[in-house]
Image (tube, rainbow, N blue to C red):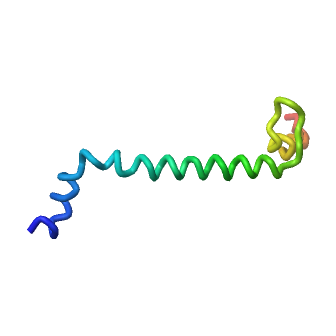
């Protein structure tokens, strides 16, 4: 029976997989873009040309110098 053969059904519908999945992926991508946009809007304003997340980066610190042993 075809209904019980998942592999056969998978192959029969192979040509339609992309058509079935594309709208779902398009909708998910739109939702992610909207979420990202709302996060950026809530962030602290930044200088022109810089993303607001750049304002939250900690500056690098110089490593402490170690005493060098003279042999």
**Quadrant where the image shows the N terminus:** bottom left
**Quadrant where the image shows the C terminus:** top right
Q: Can you tell which quarter of the image residue 54 is in?
A: top right
Residue 46 appearing in the image:
yes
11 w.r.t. 5: above or below: above
Left or right side of 61 for 38: left
Residue that appears at 12% across and 65% down:
2
Left or right side of 55 for 15: left
32 w.r.t. 9: above or below: above
Residue closer to the observer: 18 or 70: 18
Residue 66 appearing in the image:
no
Q: Residue furthest top?
A: 49
Q: Residue furthest left?
A: 1
Q: Position of residue 17 (x, y in %)?
A: 31, 49
Q: Can you tell which quarter of the image residue 3 is in?
A: bottom left
Left or right side of 68 for 18: left
Q: Position of residue 6 (x, y in %)?
A: 20, 63
29 w.r.t. 68: above or below: below
Residue that appears at 66% across and 49% down:
34
20 w.r.t. 52: above or below: below
Residue closer to the observer: 39 or 27: 27
């Amino acid at each position: 029976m075809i209904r019980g053969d998942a592999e056969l059904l998978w192959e029969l519908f192979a040509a339609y997989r992309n058509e079935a999945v594309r709208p779902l992926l398009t909708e998910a991508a739109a939702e992610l873009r909207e979420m990202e946009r709302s996060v950026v809007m809530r962030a602290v304003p930044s200088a022109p040309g810089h993303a607001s997340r750049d304002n939250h980066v900690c500056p690098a610190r110089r490593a402490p110098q170690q005493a060098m042993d003279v042999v």
